[in-house]
Image (spheres, coloured by chain):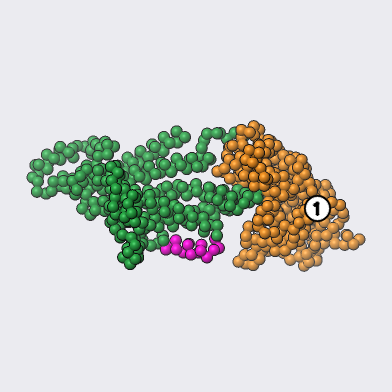
Chain colours: A green, B orange
Amino acid sequence: MLAFIIRRLAQSVLVMLFVALIAFVIFRYVGDPITSMVGVETRLEDQEIMRDRLGLNDPVVVQFARFIGNALQGEFGISYRLQQPVTELILSRLPATLELAVASALIALVFGVVLGVFTALRPKSFLTAGIMAASLVGVSLPTFLIGIGLIYVFAVELGWLPSFGRGEVVDLGWWRTGLLTESGLKSLILPAITLSLFQLTLIMRLVRAEMLEVLRTEYIRFARARGLSQRAINFGHALKNTMVPVITITGLQLGSVIAFAIVTETVFQWPGVGSLFITSVQVVDVPVMAAYLMFIALVFVLINLIVDILYYVVDPRLRVDGGAGN
Amino acid sequence: MTEPLLSVRGLTVEFPTRHGILTAVEDITLDIMPGEVLGMVGESGAGKSMTGNAIIGLIEPPGRIARGEIWLKGRRIDNLPPEEMRAIRGRRIGMIFQDPLTSLNPLFRISDQLVETIRTQLPMSQDAARKRAIQLLDDVGIPDAARRIDDYPHQFSGGMRQRVVIALALCAEPDLVIADEPTTALDVSVQAQIIDVMKQLCAERGAAILLVTHDMGVIAETADRVAVMYAGRIAEIGPVRDVIKNARHPYTEGLMGAIPRLGENLERLQQIPGAMPRLSAIPKGCAFNPRCPKVLDRCRSHRPALSPTEPGRQVACWLYDGVTEA
Ligand SMILES: Nc1ncnc2c1ncn2[C@@H]1O[C@H](COP(=O)(O)OP(=O)(O)OP(=O)(O)O)[C@@H](O)[C@H]1O
Ligand code: SF4
Ligand SMILES: [Mg+2]
């Protein structure tokens, strides 16, 4: 177990180093940091002095090492646009994105599994045909269209839910949450559904395919031959085996939910990390872009690591202890 | 004469396909007496598994029993509602599949699978079921059963796993055990042990066995009677000793040309030229006629029925037409 975790950790570090290299290249070579910071009016000699002071004339390797050293301390420089430390900016936006991502991941997981199991167990039902057709629409419609459609129906026409923003938030000191106020919860519904739909259809189709596959296996036939009840077979045996790959994929999807939140956050003007990134791209706020890249990579790497460990816990075959005695 | 435990009358299994209806098994009629071991041999695709699946009520749709009746202890079971048939599976009829590697759910401990099966079949507390499970594992010859019971399937070797499968099939002391090639997937060195364990435990409990195998050696040593299958029909059925020593049907004669020793595979010793026809291309008349060295004129146009040649013995071949009348 320990060796396995250490190996995975080492891989994670490698991946992060590689992403850091890309972030560094963006940070250092997209635009000129000095001009971006001080504007074109500053005298060239002064610019040169700053360049020296900031170490921009040092060898690239030294600069990269410094970049990583800073990154390890959570230092990504100052946003050109907002003149605020980048890390502070991202941390202040993070709760909004995480609440949105977790809410939609939960929606996607719960409905995805329920619908997937249903369609696998009732392959000939009309409802299944309807769900499968709807899911095709779900994967093929772009997120922003779904978002705009939902806004049109539930905010504009029906007026039930707000169309943008996060509603009232409560400051817990280290976390600004929208989950404790009514307006905050109402504001969460539409963006969370929008963001979840794609993953929901994905999970549903995955669960369905896996479950159908599992139901054809010999151990399910043997379970039938032993006279176990339909319920024990479907929800005891088949579901557990179905969930092993589903856990992996769903876990990994959480990473992409956070990454894909960009579009949803933009449509709903959700004050999260994604919309911060979009505005940064528009004004070439390079430190924010580089830090966002590192942040998303970190999210993926961490989730990957957790999923692998979970997988390992769920599937006894992967555990090496116990030994294969005869 | 005692009443047969199992009585199959004119069993016919069909598969509707795009190119018409395929008949996988046709007009099978056989009896199994209480405690008797009936062997079943025949080339791959002869319909052996299909017959076993039909008896235990596990034919995969769209396959279905088109004609015929199956009686267990004087009760007709081929047309029971699913819940009543489920009560028979495991309790009255147990089944052992070919591959122990895939028959056990990899994510569940052996103890869970045993206890679950026992408690489905018999009114027992968790503790009592567990005691019984350990006893069963002990009976099938798993050393240190009390400790091994909480292991996962992958922690056992193939032979040990098949012992676990046998324990599972015998949980509720069924009257009939259908063993579909129980040793084909196993190492040659353990095949004989597995057959011995199975035969001994069934004998102790008075359970009859339908033993499907490619291995004539196993049949010779284990079975009381043998049914030879060809292209979905019974070619010949009778006491093992008689059939081996004095084969009637030309196909059986070919099979018996050389009886392999225990563990050797029938297919390798195949001496009859040609191959069994596909279901979609079964020849008119006797299905064996293109390969038969003794073929008669009417073999090509008329199909011989299974008819008695001497007490306890039936053959489907024109060569013996009139033997009974004589
Ligand atoms: N789902 C299906 N659809 C159509 N035909 C099928 C289907 N399943 C099995 N069959 C056919 O039924 C026939 C009998 O198959 P069965 O599995 O009973 O053979 P078998 O005697 O057990 O052979 P083996 O020794 O290979 O196990 C075969 O010809 C097979 O092709
Ligand atoms: S019926 Fe004819 S073709 Fe068929 S086995 Fe007998 S002799 Fe051969
Ligand atoms: Mg078979």
Q: Main secondary structure of the magenta part?
A: helix
Residue at the (65%, 57%) spot, across then down:
B82
Please say if A238 is above or below B317. above
x and y percentages locating residue A7 in the rendered image: 42, 36
Residue topped by disc 1 = B4
Residue at the (87%, 62%) spot, across then down:
B322
- Left or right of A2? Residue A145 is left
Residue at the (74%, 51%) spot, across then down:
B40
x and y percentages locating residue A219 in the rendered image: 60, 48
Q: Quadrant of residue B290?
A: bottom right
Please say if A294 is above or below A165. above
Task: Tell me, yes or no, whether the highlighted magenta stretch contains residue A132.
Answer: yes
Please say if B305 is above or below A68. below
**Parent chain of label 1:** B
For the question of whether residue A282 can be seen, the reply is: yes
Q: Which residues are magenta?
A: A123-137
x and y percentages locating residue A173 in the rendered image: 28, 42
For the question of whether residue B259 can be seen, the reply is: no
What type is the residue that disc 1 sits on?
Pro
Task: Tell me, yes or no, whether the highlighted magenta stretch contains residue B312.
Answer: no
- Left or right of B290? Residue B105 is left
| Extreme-right residue of the structure | B326
Q: Quadrant of residue A73?
A: top left
x and y percentages locating residue A200 in the rendered image: 43, 56
